[in-house]
């Protein structure tokens, strides 16, 4: 019927499409812990994108991961925050 992968990730294969090509795509993207959840960054509407430049800029944003798989946040924790202080109020305060 289904196989339980994680408490919040369940494969309900009886709800999957019958098309074997689509099922193969689902299986290819399936993660044992996270299921088919993912994040994507999509660029739409630009006809002359410099893929190499965009890739280099995004790669420069990646954090180093040590041999234990942990991200060391000490390196960037003291960097200046480029965003202004938030001065807005919550919706509860404005009503």
Image: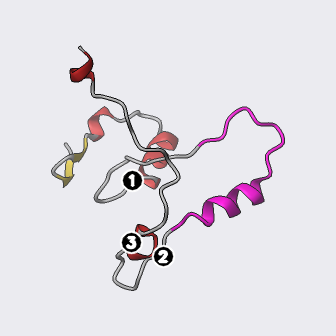
Secondary structure of the residue carrying numbered label 1: loop
- Sequence order check, earlier mark of 2 and 3: 2
- On the rendered structure, is 57 left or right of 22? right
Give the residue pinned by disc 1: 30
Q: Where, by quadrant of the figure, is residue 32 drawn?
A: bottom left
Q: CA distance from mark 2 to mark 3?
A: 9 Å
Q: CA distance from mark 1 to mark 3?
A: 29 Å
- On the rendered structure, is 38 left or right of 53? left
- On the rendered structure, is 51 left or right of 29? right
Secondary structure of the residue carrying numbered label 3: loop
Label 2 environment density (alpha carbons within 10 Å; few <14, some 14–19, many ≥20): few
> What residue appears at the point 49 percent right and 61 percent down from the top-left corner?
80
Give the residue pinned by disc 3: 73
Give the residue pinned by disc 2: 64
What range of the chain is rendered magenta?
A: 42-62
Percent of width and height locating residue 57: 67, 60
């Amino acid at each position: 019927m289904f196989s339980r992968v994680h408490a919040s990730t369940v494969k309900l294969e009886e709800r999957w499409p019958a098309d074997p090509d689509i099922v193969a795509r689902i299986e290819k993207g399936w993660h044992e812990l996270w299921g088919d959840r993912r994040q994507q960054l999509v660029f739409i509407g630009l006809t002359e994108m410099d893929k190499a430049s965009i890739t280099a800029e995004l790669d420069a944003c990646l954090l180093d991961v040590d041999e234990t798989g942990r991200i060391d946040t000490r390196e960037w924790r003291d960097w200046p925050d480029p965003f202004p202080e938030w001065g807005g109020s919550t919706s509860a305060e404005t009503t």
